[in-house]
Image (tube, rainbow, N blue to C red):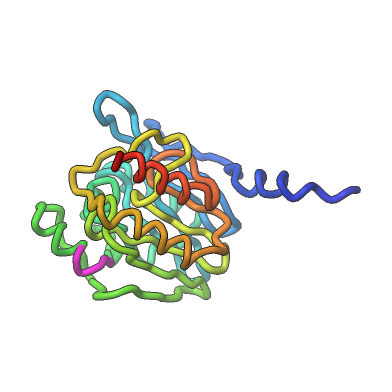
């Protein structure tokens, strides 16, 4: 049998391995690597149904949750899905900024005894906007390991919000860009009410320099892909200035 061409292998990598929909269609879970899933919940924004992605990372000791679901009910469904399908506890939840699509389910997570860890700035902004209080904060970029899985939390600078961080999984070469990164279908920057438009381009350039080996780049809203999402986001930012 002839080996598959490289570009076909790349396409297979980026295609969802399977999708599981929770009851009520509030949650989707899509496997993108042997131990990594994207969880997706939905809200209607200006009359349009918008997806919001986060990550589930399974380790030998339990699961790591990057971002809650978009609100209480999707987060409860998400926690139930992990318990039922992965049959392991959630060890920690790391929201990537203070907006509801990232930590709107914080109370539901904490009610199950799962510690919520954010940057100090995210904790401050969450408190100022009555979003709740995380259990643990970190002052600067942090790298940690759970059950043999490494995770790198990096703050490249302000962008979508002043506090947005990204999460990189070096073993899988997956970069979760969150709301800092736009998908290839995006024609604008979306919600910029709390954005730092001046710093955003530099933040994206820092991601390009720091994670050149990332094979999969996951935005918060819209299809995931490869490094081209970073270039596309830069183009949108340049058009914003014109």
State the image coordinates of residue 166 (x, y, percent, origin top left). Answer: 38, 60
Residue in the foreground of this view, choosing between 233 and 183: 233
The stretch in magenta equals 117-121
**Outermost residue, front direction?**
242
User: Looking at the picture, does residue 184 appear above or below residue 90?
Assistant: above
Q: Is residue 89 visible?
A: no
> In this picture, is 16 found above or below 215?
above
| Residue 229, horizontal then vertical, whole percent | 48, 47
20 relative to 130 in the view: left or right: right
Q: Is residue 184 magenta?
A: no
**For the C terminus, which image quadrant?**
top left
Q: Residue at x 34, y 49 (%)?
A: 179
Total labels drawn: 0
Picture quadrant of residue 158? bottom left
Q: Nearer the viewer, residue 92 or 157?
A: 157
Residue 51 percent location from the top left of the image = 37, 37
Task: Give the overall secondary structure of the magenta segment.
Answer: strand
Q: Residue 126 at what x, y percent from top left?
A: 15, 57
């Amino acid at each position: 049998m002839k080996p598959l061409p490289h570009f076909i292998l790349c396409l297979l990598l980026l295609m969802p391995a399977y999708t599981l929909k929770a009851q009520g269609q509030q949650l989707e879970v899509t496997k993108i690597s042997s131990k990594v899933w994207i969880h997706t919940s939905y809200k209607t924004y200006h009359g349009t149904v918008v997806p919001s992605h986060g990550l589930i990372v399974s380790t030998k000791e339990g699961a790591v949750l990057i971002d809650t679901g978009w609100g209480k009910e999707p987060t409860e469904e998400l926690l139930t899905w992990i318990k039922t399908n992965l049959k392991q506890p959630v060890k920690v939840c790391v929201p990537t900024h203070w907006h509801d699509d990232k930590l709107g389910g914080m109370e539901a997570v904490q009610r199950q005894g799962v510690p919520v860890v954010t940057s100090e700035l995210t904790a401050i902004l969450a408190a100022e906007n009555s979003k709740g209080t995380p259990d643990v904060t970190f002052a600067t970029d942090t790298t940690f390991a759970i059950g043999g899985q490494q995770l790198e939390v990096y703050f490249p600078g302000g962008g979508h919000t002043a506090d947005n961080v990204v999460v990189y999984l070096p073993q899988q070469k997956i970069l979760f860009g969150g709301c800092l990164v736009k998908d290839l279908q995006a024609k604008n920057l979306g919600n910029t009410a709390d954005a730092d438009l001046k710093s955003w381009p530099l933040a994206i350039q820092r991601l390009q320099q720091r994670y050149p080996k990332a094979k999969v780049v996951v935005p918060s809203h819209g299809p995931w892909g490869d490094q081209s999402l970073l270039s596309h986001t830069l183009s949108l930012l340049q058009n914003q200035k014109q």
